[in-house]
Amino acid sequence: GWVIIFVGIILEFVSDIQLLVFKKKKENKGKLCMTGLWRWSRHPNFFFEAVVWWGFYITACSIKWGYITIWAPVVITLTLRYVSGVPLIEEKYKDREDFEQYKKQTNCFIPWFPKSASQVTQRIIVENPEKERRRNLS
């Protein structure tokens, strides 16, 4: 639990710093940050905030009745994802063309590989089905 808390705090901090540094550069004025952790998630700061709370829950499970604290990370995660954090930012940028492209390529909340990379992989499999079939047989 403590490791998860630590990793969550560090990565939330890193995502906030990456956004701050990006916004401070004059050449980025009016642009969306799509680098660093922001390449893997449109809201890494909110995701890692939720991770911290899940770490607290896991830590609490080590004591008697600690499992009843499950409500805290559930409420925080759902609030960040569906009520306050993500929806407010998504609404702010919804009419921007660059944001629409960013949405198509980047996972909303949970950091994951950019969709364009997975689409390239999928296209390779479709273009080379025999090679893929042989690979799966080995």
Image (cartoon, rainbow, N blue to C red):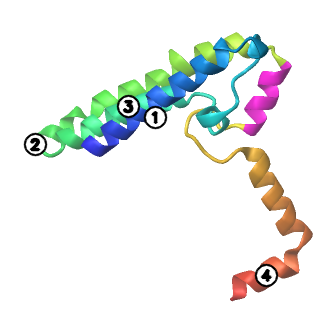
User: Element type at marker 1?
Assistant: helix
Give the residue drawn at x 67%, y 13%. 91
Q: What residue is pinned by disc 4?
A: 133
> Could you say which disc has been placed on residue 63 in the image?
2
| Other residues around mark 3 within 10 Å, as few (<14) / some (14–19) / many (≥20) | some
User: Extreme left residue here?
Assistant: 64
User: Element type at marker 4?
Assistant: helix
| Other residues around mark 4 within 10 Å, as few (<14) / some (14–19) / many (≥20) | few
User: Element type at marker 3?
Assistant: helix
Check whether the beta carbons of the residues at disc 3 and disc 1 lie within 8 A of each other: yes
The image quadrant where one finds the N terminus is: top left
What percent of the width, then of the height, locates residue 31? 76, 17
- Viewer-nearest of labels 2 and 1? 1
**Type of residue at label 3?**
Ile
**Type of residue at label 1?**
Leu
Give the residue drawn at x 76%, y 51%. 117
Q: What residue is pinned by disc 1?
A: 11
| Other residues around mark 2 within 10 Å, as few (<14) / some (14–19) / many (≥20) | few
Check whether the beta carbons of the residues at disc 4 and disc 2 lie within 8 A of each other: no
Magenta-tinted stretch:
97-105
